[in-house]
Every structure is written in structure tokens, then in C-alpha cells.
Amino acid sequence: MRVKGGLQTKKRHKKYLAMAKGYRAGRRTLYRSAREGVERGLCFAYRDRKARKRDMRSLWIVRISAAAKALGTSYSRLIDALKKANVAIDRKMLSELASTDPQSFASLVKATQIA
């Protein structure tokens, strides 16, 4: 007697169809189309988790650069001055300061220029 494995197949199919929830047309209801869409989506999700980190860093740099230019310095000079003054603050926090609290950002820039 041969083993068909229907239960495992059904579980696997249900898993992919559940992951395809929200897709349109056959992508949601047909197993093969759903599996193709889900696997492709998972590849994009993996890739874009890495890309998001790059995108956010470049956004922070743009914000810091704009705020630094408004205070009469450039981004690269500001970062160099921060390193020389031993100010251990990362780009994410700098951009938050620049966008939410411009006065404290300006005082930080002045302190680095003095040092």
C-alpha cells in the first residue's frame, strides 16, 4: 500500500494560502499562484529589511546636513568636529535633535565649533 501524505500536503497548502491573505484574484485562492506570490514577497521582505537600514541612514544624513547648513557649517565638518570633541552621538539622534529641537542642535554645533 502506498503512502499519499494528503494531510501534510493540505497543511502545507493551507500555510501558503494563509500567508497569501490580502492578495487579489487567484493569487489568494489558487495554491500554485499563492505560493509563487508568497515566496516572491518573502524575498522582497528579506531584501528590503536590509535596504531600510541604508535608506534611514541616508535620510538622517540629509536632515543633519540641512540643519548644519542653516547654521553655517557643512555635514562633514560637523561630524569631524563631533569626533574631535569626543561627542558620542549617533546620526539617528542628531537628526532627531535637528528636526524636533533646533535650539539644542544649535548649541551642540556651537559647542563643537568652540572645541
Image: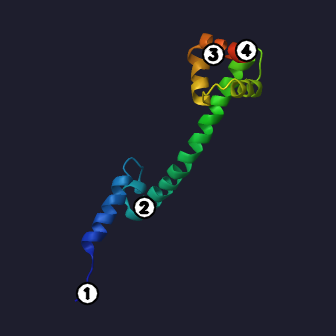
Query: Measuring 73% from the left and 17% from the top, which residue is drawn there?
Result: 115
- Residue for badge 2: 35
* Sequence-earlier tag: 4 or 3: 4
Label 1 with label 2: CB-CB less than 8 Å? no
Crowdedness near tag 4: few (<14), some (14–19) or many (≥20) residues, C-alpha within 10 Å: few
Image location of residue 17, percent across then percent down = 35, 57
> In the image shown, does 60 or 47 lie closer to the viewer?
60
Image location of residue 23, percent across then percent down = 42, 49
> How far apart are the two marked residues, 4 and 1, measured between alpha carbons?
76 Å
Label 4 with label 3: CB-CB less than 8 Å? no
- In the rendered structure, find residue 53 and report the number of the disc placed on it: none
* Sequence-earlier tag: 3 or 2: 2
- Residue for badge 1: 2
* Sequence-earlier tag: 1 or 3: 1
- Residue for badge 4: 70
Label 1 with label 3: CB-CB less than 8 Å? no
The picture quadrant where one finds residue 52 is top right
Tell me which amino acid carries mark 3. Answer: Phe
> How far apart are the two marked residues, 1 and 3, measured between alpha carbons?
73 Å
Image location of residue 96, percent across then percent down = 57, 22
Determine the secondary structure under disc 2: helix
Tell me which amino acid carries mark 4. Answer: Ala
> In the image shown, does 50 or 24 lie closer to the viewer?
50
Determine the secondary structure under disc 3: helix
